[in-house]
Amino acid sequence: MIKIMKRLLTGVLTLATVFTALPTTAVHAAQTQYWTESAERVGIVEKVMNDGSIGSTFNEGHMTVEGEDAYCIDINTNFKNGYKTRADASTRMSADQIADVALSIEYVKQYTDSHKGISSQHAYLLRQLVVWQRLSVHLGWGCDNVRAAYDEIPKAIQDEVFAGAKAFVKENKGRYDCYGYIYTGGGQDIGQFYAKLAVGNGKIQKSSSNTGITESNDCYSIAGATYGVYADKSCKEQLATLTTENSGSTETVELKAATYYVKETKAPKGFQLDKNVYTLTVKAGETATLKVSDTPKVTDTLIELFKIDMETSKADPQGNASLEGAEFVWKYYDGYYTKDNLPAEPTRTWTTKTKAEKGSDNAIHYITRLADSYKVSGDSFYTQNGTVCLPLGTITVEEKSAPNGYLLEGAYMQAAGSSEQIKGLYVAQITEDSELAVLSGSNQYSVSDKVIRGGVKIQKRDFETKDTKAQGGATLKDTAFAIISLNDNAVLVDGKLYRKNETVKTIHTGIDGIAATDTDTLPFGKYRLEETSAPEGYLTDGAKAVEFEITENGKIVDLTDEEHSIYNQIKRGDIEGVKIAAGTHKRLANVPFRITSKTTGESHVIVTDANGQFSTSADWVSHTQNTNEGKTSEDGIWFGTSAPDDSKGALPYDTYTIEELCCDSNKGMTLIPAFDVVVSRDKTVIDLGTLTDEYEPEITIHTTAADKATGEKSIVAGKSVTIVDTVTLDGLKKGTKYQLKGWQMVKAENAQLLVDGKPVENDYTFTAKKSRMEIEMTFTFNASALGGSDLVTFEELYDLSNPDEPIKVAEHKDIEDDGQTVTITERVITVHTTATSKTTGEKMIVAGKEVTIVDTVTLDGLETGTEYQLKGWQMVKSENAQLLVDGKPVENDLTFTATDSKMEIQIEFTFNASELAGKELVTFEELYDVTNPDEPIKVAEHKDINDKGQTVTITERIITMHTTACDKATGEKTINADKEVTIVDTVTLDGLETGTQYQLKGWQMVKSKNAQLLVGGKPVENDLTFTATDSKMEVQIEFTFNASELGGKELVTFEELYDVTNPDEPIKIAEHKNIEDEGQTVTVKEQPESPATPEESNTPETPNRTGSSPKTGDNTPLAALLAMLGISSAGLIFAAHKRFYKKKAD
């Protein structure tokens, strides 16, 4: 029975619930009705009054009209589901009120769309709240701050939304078209409000109409152009200004949806102003982009270059030269530059050449410009509208190669009417001038090139000998040559223009037979040389014309070879005479006469016949018969090197000395003095007349040569030795002036001694005081290279009674004479050395970056006053090879001047011996005589690889490490398990190289794992860089880390030492890594356990608050709610009653 009652009660409660949930049915009016309802609850609302009090709290529902969102517009009236009639909001609200509410709703929509985490119910509730807030302000409800409960929607969000809505309304009035509807009927009125965006955006996208000109050119920029946006086509009512950026795009401007007119008011840099008016149609909510382009400013006024001759300043080339074909390099740079700051690379480059063109004056001009008809190579030209042009920027032009016959060097450009000469690179700028691009400077320049100039050199030669030397006393000097132009074009020589076949210059030969112009006398072209006057002593026979060309600047055309030289025949004559004895007038046969050219020294002997007669003429004896034998009267005579020719005289133009020679026929006679004869006429025999002799006795010479310093017959080789020759003369004439001449001979060669190409000789002039005299004569010279040579002194004695014609009266020239002989002995220099360490003086050196070996060298046998250079270098004994460190030999040298014959000097060798441990190094030496620094002479050496005195051993450098690790704070070997502890490791290093930079690296190891300690996944490590100030040092390195998890662990410090002289390639040179080393070990103490912390009791949760206040606009029927409440109460009472009686029965 109880179960039946329970089921019945449950059914009644369910029925009551369904019943109360059913919607009420409204009565429809005849006009259009709209269904309104509250579909679901969206949250609790607190009606906050303007005095801060809360007027009421209620649940709010989600209102709709025909399924679309609507909002309560009467907070003080309850809502009822049902049909309502609609009216335009403007019938009850001002436009400002409608806009205020509509824009507030629009803001909340935008806010909730952009903020995640706000439910659709709360989004709706926020919109409803701003509607009430704005209407409260307008209608005076006094609840301007109505809000949702903060546990529904957080205060921060509500504050942000309410403030934002107010700001949005202010900022957007006029940007939206706002309207709405109000629905009225049973219960409160509701409304729908809409804000429709009424504006759009406009912008401009600008570009260049000729990107080939402007792209990547900083002289142009589409940034900075300004455009006016106008409401009218005449562009008088301006609404906005747009300015382009670097991309050509402007900022956007907001405009009401409509059609506008756009015009450029300011052109950007480098562009012409666009005067067109464009239309821009703006649609709401869209961005309209107007695409426009500007025309870049360029110049088509280009530079013209006119090539002219620099010397004549006319477009007339000289000689065989041409002004056509000159090449110019043009370079364009897309920026404004001067000659001093031009970039390394141009933007474009062109090469053009000059062409011959007939001008309006019918004259030929040689022109080039930037055009295809002149172009040789290069980039394409800039063009605009089909015309070659130049953009804004910098243009340079420079002559690259001169035309044929002209020089590039010294060329210059010059504008008409200007005195300025522009040499080398010409730089001009193309700049903006109002709406134009203007080329700086002139657009027409003459370019002056200097014609190639050279010269000519011609050789006058003897016709017979083909030689460049004149025969006899003739000369090749003063031959005159005319230089004649063979060019169609005029040439400028010495300031005057000469036409074809005119003599442009006359030149004359010098003493060497050469006639030459200066190196710049003749312009580029072809010429002819003609002899116009023969030199003294020569005939004009044999001369011929020679043609030549000038093609290289500053070069002399050399016509001095045999093929091109001009030849002349020398004048030749003869002599004849008779030889007799004095008194008897006896004809003296077989008397020789020496005929000597006073010019050349050439000498030949002619002998008298049985009648004492002699003649050089071929009519007397043929020139070709026993030519110049000089033994009999039947031997012919011929002077010069050419072949004898009986058609010519024997003697070339010259002055000759005729000297009678001693012979049996004139023995005991006083010979006639020598006399001169001049041969100056061609094919003429000169009669010398009768030559008569008289009679007399002789002078003897005895000599002894020795070392002046020692008196010995041997001398040690040296730079300055002196031989003294003691000469005894017998048979002198008292009162007569004599000259004794002496010189040194090399006995082995029987030739005169030459030192530095000069003979070693001397002379002594004296007047005889008696018939027998003893005279000393000295010979001082450099005998350094004469060791082992025997030198013999030769002498001749001359009678100077006639100083102009000295007569040799005696001589002593016996190569085998021991008295005249001195021997030069070799100079021997010995070298003894000892090599040691400079620092210790020992024979062992520890390997290091900078060690010094000092070599003490004893030299014996030096020549005092001589400058020497001692060179030394280090050898590796085991390799018997020169020591190289970093690819370079270890060597040194010392230059000194000997102050004694025996000296001790020191030479040092400093080098990096780091890699040479275990090596034996041997010092080698060479000694040089550097009296002539350009040609040093090695005079001694010491190079014995096994010499212990020269040997030094490099020993290995060993670095030892000793370490002690402890707690930095206590100095103990144990450390607490704290979050920050520091182990300090004291490291003693021995064997360091002073001055070297080292790096000590250390890290912590876990002894039990023999593995590196990691804390937080990172190794505990550190390093220290220092420079050694001593060979033994103590340094400290610290390790700070979190040891809170390391209780009970033993930590061992490991170290490595690096040489970091080269930081990029450190070298490990020592380490200390012993896991069992107690000195390196520190123990981390165990962490004591802490008592457990009791768990905190859970704080009871605060029960959720349920609102009991009815929500405005609740559509549940009140009667149904009361019925449901009554039935529920009856059921509860019945159930309690039954439970009470059941317990009681139990």
Image: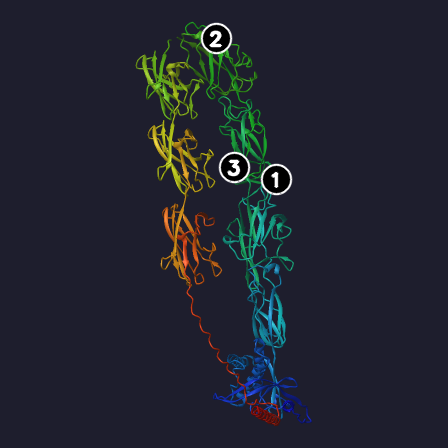
Residue sitting farthest toward the front = 1146
| Colour pattern | rainbow
Residue 9 appearing in the image: no
Looking at the rendered image, the quarter that the N terminus falls into is bottom right
405 or 759, which is in the foreground?
759
Q: Secondary structure at mark 2?
A: loop
Indicate the position of residue 1037 as horizontal and vertical percent values: 40, 54
Vertical placement of residue 304 versus 142, above or below? above
The numbered dot on residue 636 is: none
Look at label 2 and name its amino acid: Asn
Residue 438 position, x and y percent, is 56, 59
Q: Could you tell me which secondary element the residue under label 3 belongs to?
A: loop
Label 3 to label 2: alpha-carbon separation: 59 Å
Q: Is residue 421 left or right of residue 363?
A: left
Q: Which residue is mark 2?
A: 590
The x and y percentages for residue 770 are 30, 13
Residue placed under numbered mark 3 in the picture: 519
Q: Position of residue 260 (x, y in %)?
A: 62, 75
**Whole-number angstrom distance, CA of label 2 to CA of label 1:** 69 Å
Q: Residues within 10 Å of mark 1 (few under 14, many from 20)?
A: some
Amino acid type assigned to the residue bearing label 1 in the image: Asp
Q: CA distance from mark 1 to mark 3?
A: 22 Å
Residue in front for this viewpoint, 198 or 874: 874
Residue 630 placement, left or right of 363:
left
Left or right of residue 762, residue 597 in this image: right
Q: Nearer the viewer, residue 688 or 344?
A: 344
Q: Nearer the viewer, mark 2 or mark 1?
A: 2
State the residue position of label 1.
Answer: 488
| Closer to the camera in the image, 318 or 1032 | 1032
